[in-house]
Image (cartoon, rainbow, N blue to C red):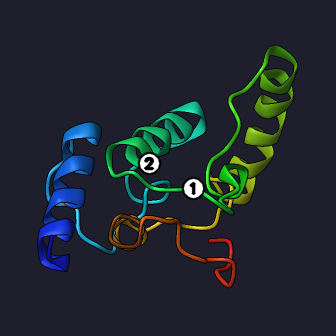
Amino acid sequence: MSTSKVEKSVVSWFEQRLRRKNLTLQSRLYHDCGVDGDDGDELLDAFFQEFNIEPNGINLSQHFNDEPHIFSMLLGIFFLLIHLLQGRFRTKKIPIYIQDCVEAAVNGAWPNISNRHFE
């Protein structure tokens, strides 16, 4: 399959899964699409299976937050209030772009994005 066909296929797959239109190769799963927690884990697991990708080297906690538990929810409310007072709403995470997923689909393995910074 040509790269442009893979691009279209991957973008379409994410648009259907996320029920969003107009995703681009530069769309970020957490930052732009709001994918987080177990939803992020499940989304990428389904993507890896659908496109037969070996997920070597990906640490999902760098890209998505963990699902809260009761104690962490209470603690989270406290930190949320602090963040709101400081004008920050989201935890910084390393972005995963749709382009990364296209590259993974083309190569059959997760790309090395270890040089990326938290945003």
For residue 16, which quarter of the picture? top left
Residue under the image location 43 percent in, 56 percent down: 29
Which tag, 1 or 2, sits closer to the chain's start?
2
Seen from the viewer's position, the closer of residues 82 and 46 is 46
Q: Which residue does the numbered mark 2 point to in the structure image?
A: 48
Seen from the viewer's position, the closer of residues 104 and 72 is 104
Residue under the image location 20 percent in, 69 percent down: 7
In the picture, the quarter occupied by the N terminus is bottom left
Q: In this view, does 65 lie to the left or right of 45?
A: right
Q: Where is residue 35 in the image (x, y as percent from the top left)?
A: 46, 44
Q: Is residue 34 visible?
A: no
SS state under label 1: loop
Eyeballing the image, is 101 above or below 33?
Answer: below
Q: What residue type is labelled 2?
A: Phe
Q: Which residue does the numbered mark 1 point to in the structure image?
A: 55
Residue under the image location 74 percent in, 58 percent down: 86
Q: Residue 106 carries which label?
A: none
Q: Residues within 10 Å of mark 1 (few under 14, many from 20)?
A: some
Q: Position of residue 38 (x, y in %)?
A: 58, 32
In the picture, the quarter occupied by the C terminus is bottom right
Q: How far apart are marks 1 and 2 (CA)?
A: 7 Å
Q: Which amino acid does label 1 sit on?
A: Pro
Q: Residue furthest top?
A: 70
Q: In this view, does 74 lie to the left or right of 20?
A: right
CB atoms at circles 1 and 2 under 8 Å apart? yes
For residue 68, which quarter of the picture? top right
Q: Position of residue 39 (x, y in %)?
A: 50, 33
Q: Position of residue 44 (x, y in %)?
A: 47, 46
Residue under the image location 81 percent in, 41 percent down: 79
Seen from the viewer's position, the closer of residues 8 and 69 is 8
